Image (cartoon, grey):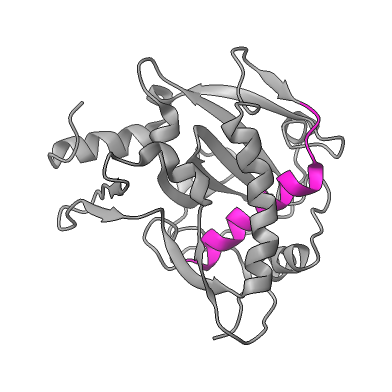
C-alpha cells in the first residue's frame, strides 16, 4: 500500500481519476451517475460520484485537491467558456491550472479502469511527470503541453459527455490512429493523450525526438496565465460519434 505519487506508506485514499466536479452534470434525480459501456456484455451501471481507485496518500490527495478546487471554481463560474471562436482565457494561475492538467494525465496513466486503461506513458515520462507533481513544478509551457477545445453541439449539453481516454500515435505523413498495444511509438512520432470531459476535448501532445511548431505551442497555457481555446463540434469528432452510434446500436441510447 504505497502512494503512487510520493511513494510513502500508509493508508491510501479512494482517489478520483477525473475530478469529481466534472461528473456533476451527469447526475440523475436519484443522485447517481448512470454509466454506459460499448461492451455488449456490460449493462448500464450506477456509480455515486465518478471512477475512483486507491492510489494516493492523504497528503498527495490534499495537494491534488487544491489544484482541482482552483479549476472547479473557474469551471462552475463559467470562466472557461465564451461565445467566440477562438477565444482566450486570461488571468489564470499557471501553476494551479497546469498541475491540474498534469495530475489528470498521471492519474489516468495509473488507472486500471476501462475508461483510462489505454492512456500510456513510457517509463521516462512516467517518472518525469511524477517528479513534477511531487515538487508542484508545472514545468515549461510545452512540457506535457495540452491543447483545449470547447465542445459544442446544438441542443446538447456537452458537459454531459465523458468519453474513454486514449493515447494515440500520429506518424509523419499519416493520419492519427489509435496506438496498437503491441506496437510502441518510436522516435519521430507524436503521441497524443486525449480526454473528453467537462465540455472540453483536452489533448496532451508528446513529441518523440521532434520539435513542435510555434503554431502548435501557442495553444498551450502560457506562463502569464493565458490559454487560447478553439471550438469543435461533436459531429466532427469521429471517435465520439463512433461511441454514440455504438451505444445506439446496442439499444443503450436513444438518438
Q: Where is residue 131? Give x, y as percent.
A: 76, 68
Q: In the displayed structure, would residue 50 be above or below residue 60? A: above
The one of 244 and 59 positioned closer to us in this rendering: 59
Q: Quadrant of residue 181?
A: bottom left
Main SS of residues in magenta: helix
Q: In the displayed structure, would residue 27 be above or below residue 255? A: below
Residue 124 among those drawn in magenta: no
Is the C terminus in the top left, top right, bottom left or bottom right quadrant? top left
Q: Read off the magenta span.
A: 90-111
Q: Where is residue 157? Give x, y as percent.
A: 40, 26
Residue at left offset 35%, top offset 16%? 155
The answer to whether residue 133 is seen in the rendering is: yes
The answer to whether residue 239 is seen in the rendering is: no
Residue at left offset 36%, top offset 40%? 26
Could you tell whether 105 is left or right of 44 in the image? right
Residue at left offset 39%, top offset 64%? 113
Q: Quadrant of residue 126?
A: bottom right
Q: Where is residue 55? Give x, y as percent.
A: 54, 72
Q: In the displayed structure, would residue 148 be above or below residue 187? A: above
Considering every residue shown, the one lying at the far front of the view is: 30
Amino acid at each position: 500500500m504505497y502512494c503512487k505519487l510520493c511513494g510513502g506508506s500508509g493508508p491510501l485514499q479512494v482517489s478520483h481519476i477525473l475530478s469529481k466536479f466534472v461528473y456533476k452534470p451527469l447526475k440523475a434525480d436519484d443522485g447517481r451517475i448512470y454509466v454506459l459501456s460499448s461492451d455488449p456484455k456490460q449493462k448500464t451501471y450506477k456509480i455515486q460520484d465518478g471512477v475512483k481507485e486507491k492510489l494516493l496518500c492523504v497528503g498527495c490527495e490534499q495537494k491534488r485537491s487544491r489544484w482541482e478546487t482552483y479549476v472547479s471554481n473557474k469551471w462552475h463560474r463559467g470562466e472557461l467558456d465564451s461565445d467566440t471562436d477562438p477565444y482566450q482565457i486570461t488571468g489564470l494561475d499557471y501553476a494551479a491550472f497546469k498541475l491540474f492538467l498534469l495530475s489528470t494525465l498521471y492519474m489516468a496513466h495509473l488507472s486500471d479502469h476501462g475508461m483510462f486503461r489505454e492512456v500510456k506513458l513510457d517509463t521516462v515520462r512516467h517518472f518525469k511527470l511524477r517528479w513534477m507533481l511531487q515538487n508542484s513544478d508545472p514545468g515549461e509551457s510545452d512540457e506535457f503541453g495540452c491543447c483545449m477545445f470547447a465542445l459544442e453541439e446544438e441542443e446538447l449539453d456537452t458537459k454531459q459527455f465523458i468519453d474513454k481516454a486514449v493515447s494515440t500515435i500520429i506518424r509523419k505523413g499519416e493520419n492519427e490512429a489509435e496506438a496498437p498495444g503491441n506496437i510502441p511509438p518510436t522516435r519521430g512520432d507524436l503521441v497524443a493523450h486525449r480526454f473528453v470531459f467537462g465540455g472540453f476535448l483536452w489533448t496532451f501532445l508528446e513529441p518523440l525526438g521532434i520539435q513542435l511548431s510555434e503554431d502548435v505551442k501557442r495553444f498551450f497555457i502560457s506562463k502569464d496565465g493565458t490559454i487560447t481555446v478553439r471550438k469543435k463540434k461533436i459531429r466532427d469528432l469521429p471517435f465520439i460519434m463512433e461511441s454514440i452510434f455504438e451505444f445506439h446500436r446496442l439499444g443503450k441510447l436513444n438518438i
